[in-house]
Amino acid sequence: MAELPLLFEIYRLNIVDEENFMFDFMGVNIRTDDQILQVIRGITNPDLSVITQSGRTTLQWNAREFFLVSSDHGPICSITLGRSTVEQNGKTATADGFEEATTTLSPPPAETFHIFFYMRRHLVVVEYRSELMRNQLWRSSLHNMLDEAAAESGFTSHIRLEPVPEENKILQAFRSFDKLTRLRVKLRIPNPELDRRTERLRQEMVANGIREYTQDMKNPSGLSLSEEGLPFATAAMAQAGYKDGEVTMTGFRNGQRRTVRTGSKAMRGRIEGFRDFVRGMSANARTVEGKNILARITEEVDKLAELPTPPGHEQ
């Protein structure tokens, strides 16, 4: 029987600094890959978990099986994220009929999926499991664990996974307007990738000490649609995943006023025949076959979320 394909989504790893810490003795900001890896390793602490409620079910989220591997694509680390069903409310049969009851499961059954951190590009590859990812509970729970692990390590920054939109979705929407009158998005400073289209905007953010930049550009006569202009650079940075939430664009297409909200869904990919192997990744990652699998995953990610053209390398 043929192995099932590995389905995955792609996210950008963003660093968000906490506003409420004014003095150095309160902690330090996350800036290096080693610090990021320290926090990711920290969430696999057995004492760290997050409890959430989904309808009539109480869920517990845990991370386990951290590993770090050196590869031709740079360091790659992985964790396994699990969702356990702790309690469930519902009807229970009795001698006289049915009554409401809470069932406690011990030990609670867990469903799991793998998350790979492609550190050279600050991209995150999340194994797609529809039954676990039909809402954003998995991501908010992961963020909560990352926050706790960061605080325990003395960091005042947060690590966030932001969807990398599929197939140039944001740039396609941008280019679809005959006249764009409004563009709204919150940007986060890109690191480590520089794109020729976003170089100037990034340099301005760095020079002015800006880590987050909420842009709300308006012009009833139309914003510039040039690829050399600030609106396009803003859209390109958001397309790369250096943003918080969706991008909103308003303007005119074929004489009709339109508003487009995009960028909230992550790009998806698939690799045939890898799913079963990935399920045993924690045991196999350091083998030759395991490293080949990781190389195949990163190569596929590079195809989908193409490497940016560095400044000075335009054709």
Image (tube, rainbow, N blue to C red):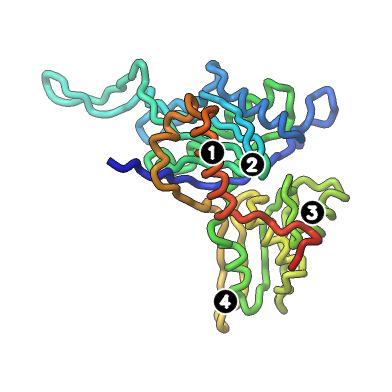
Alpha carbon of mark 3 to alpha carbon of mark 4: how far? 31 Å
Identify the residue shown where x is 50% and y is 39%. 293
Residue 110, compared with residue 202, is above or below; it is above
The residue lying at 56 percent from left, 25 percent from top is: 66
* The quarter of the displayed image where residue 250 is located: bottom right
Which residue position is annotated with label 1? 294
Q: Is mark 2 on a helix, strand or loop?
A: loop
The mark nearer the N terminus, 3 or 1, is 3
Q: Which residue is depicted at the point 74% across and 30% down?
A: 156
* Quadrant of the snapshot with the N terminus: top left
Q: Is residue 220 left or right of residue 98?
A: right
* Quarter occupied by the C terminus: bottom right
Nearer the N terminus, badge 2 or badge 4?
2
* Numbered label attached to residue 73: 2
List the residue tagged with mark 3. 202
Q: Name the residue under label 4.
A: 257
